[in-house]
Image: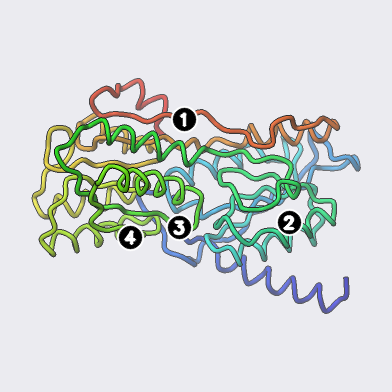
Amino acid sequence: MTKSLKKTISVAAAAFMCMSLAACGSSAPAPAATEAPAADTTAAPAETKAASGGNIKVGIINNDPNESGYRTANDKDLKAKFTAENGYDAQFAYSLKNDEQITAATKFIQDEVDYLLLSAADTAGWDSVLQDAKNAGVKVILFDRTIDADPSLYEASIVSDMDKEGKTAVEWLKGQNLSEYNIIHIQGVMGSAAQKGRSGALIDEAAASGWNILTSQTAEWNAEKAEQIVKSQIDSGAKFNVIYAENDDMAKGAVAALDKANISHGVGKDVIVMGFDCNKWALEELLNKNWNYDGQCNPFQAQYLDDVIKKLQNGETISEKTIIMEEKGFDASTITQEDVDKYGI
């Protein structure tokens, strides 16, 4: 690699690291490109060693940890696992933009990491940089989100079944047997695996069952944007009885708009409220009958990633390329305090 190319990559990577933190559900969601640090690095020897006899070097590309309670829990889980004490030299980079994530991936490849752990901002556009990783001997493991790339370009994919999450939620909604379905659909970041799975199930069922989706708009996982979407519908005089929000923060924002307009919501009320991610505060809303449904999205992937890396380090074959984590949906009519304590994040 020429000095000029190295300099170009380094400058691009530095720009990425300064642009981190942008938006899946939080009590204090952050907008894109905040001033929070884009990368953290820890390093030291430990129990698990790379093939060369040193630390296992990993580059971890994730979404904004301030975006949601889910993402905060996910990032905390990863940082607790990929430490010096556990044998890792870990670097972290964050963004909700594919081009910035790809810049970070290029930098990690240049840094000769052993593994690239990726939670992609978008499902498309990864073939080229993952081919570069493969050519450089860097093993790629996906977590949290799937991508549209040749499976030969990554070792394993540790994910939630977003399609199943959506179908589970929509089946629950169908089971409410409403006389009519007038739905405000609040979407997450467009193109993300979570958005595609949760949106697809609703849109398909609406077409099959004749449900009326008044609007489908992205709030990019953000509570304030979701509040504005619902306020706009209220101001227009639209009649609705379901809010299908693709994460908890957006459901919270939607409820804020309902409260300001004195529209009742929850069990036995005017509007059914649905969210995803199972933040503890959201499950408490179900327990108090203020919301109706919350779909689980498991943020704890670090142990799965560690297990895969250890198998690869030992020369073992990963039998299942796609590793699906078990998840469920919660109904306000049946949820218990035990559920809140066990599953709330």
* Residue labelled with disc 1: 327
Question: In this rendering, which labeled residue sits more in front, label 1 or label 3?
Answer: 1
* Quarter that holds the N terminus: bottom right
What's the amino acid at mark 2? Leu
- CA separation, marks 2 and 1? 29 Å
Q: Secondary structure at mark 1?
A: loop
The span from disc 1 to disc 4 (Cα, nearest Å) is 26 Å
Q: Position of residue 77 (x, y in %)?
A: 56, 38
Of mark 1 and mark 4, the one earlier in the sequence is 4
Q: Inspect the image, locate mark 1, and give the three-letter code of the amino acid beneath it.
A: Glu
**Which numbered disc, 1 or 3, marks the residue that appears first in the sequence?**
3
* Sequence-first disc among 4 and 3: 3
Residue designated by label 2: 130
Q: Nearer the viewer, mark 2 or mark 3?
A: 2
Find residue 5 and report its horizontal and vertical position in percent: 81, 75
| Tag in front: 1 or 4 | 4
- N-terminal of the pair, mark 2 or mark 4, is 2
Q: Which residue is mark 4?
A: 217
Q: Residues within 10 Å of mark 2 (few under 14, many from 20)?
A: many
- Res. 156 image quadrant: top right
**Residue shown at the point (10%, 48%) measured from the top left:** 263
Using residue 82 as the reference point, say whether residue 275 is left or right of it.
left
Q: Which residue is mark 3?
A: 23
Q: Is residue 215 left or right of residue 233?
A: right
Query: Are the residues at dot 1 and dot 4 in contact (C-beta closer than 8 Å)?
Result: no
- Determine whether the residue tagged by mark 4 lies in a helix, strand or loop: strand
